[in-house]
Amino acid sequence: MTALRMLWLALAIWGTIHPMYWFITWFVENEWSLLAMVDAWHANTATTGLVWDLTIAAVALTLFVLVETWQRRRFLGLLAIPATFCIGVSCGVPLYLFLRSAPDKT
């Protein structure tokens, strides 16, 4: 595995663990209320802007993954879509780059 692929994998792991620590901490403190978290995301204009920024990035990544999958026929990259929407863009982007950079099977 190349150094760059290891870096993508490390970033995907970090992009999973670090945000999930904060999400789980918040959920524990707020009785696992998803509606309360959505409300917190819109607590002020700064957080609302951040939510929209990440949402647009997630949609753009999803479209990119779908187009690339269609063209390259490498379906494992589709794992980045649920990773993006269930964990976050911080996991989805490096995960897709890790999967995409795998050597071609010949």
Image (cartoon, grey):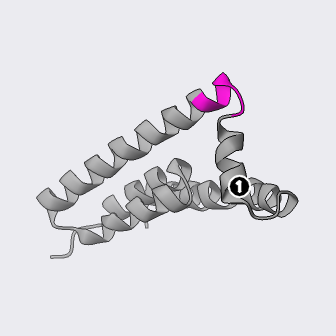
Residue 96 in the figure: left or right of residue 27: left
Horizontal and vertical percent position of residue 30: 83, 57
The C terminus - image quarter: bottom left
Q: Quarter-wise, where is residue 41 in the image?
A: top right
Q: For residue 44: magenta?
A: yes
Locate residue 55, reporting x and y percent: 47, 41
Residue 10 visible in the current orientation = yes
Q: Examine the rendered structure and indicate whether residue 14 appears above or below residue 56.
A: below
The quarter of the picture where residue 25 lies is bottom right
Between 1 and 90, the residue placed more toward the observer is 90
Along the viewing direction, whichever of 30 and 17 lies nearer the viewer:
30
Instruction: Determine if the magenta segment contains residue 79.
Output: no
- Residue 100 x/y as whole percent: 32, 59
**Looking at the image, which residue is at 39% across and 54% down?**
97
Q: Residue at coordinates 76% horizontally, 53% vertically from top-left? A: 22
* SS at circle 1: helix
Q: Residue at left 68%, top 43%?
A: 39
Q: Nearer the viewer, residue 25 or 95?
A: 25
Look at label 1 and name its amino acid.
Answer: His
Question: Where does label 1 land, which residue?
Answer: 18
Q: Which residues are magenta?
A: 43-48
Graded by Cα atoms within 10 Å as few (under 14), some (14 to 19) or many (20 or more), the crowding at tag 1 reads few
Quarter containing the N terminus? bottom left
Residue placed furthest toward the bottom: 106
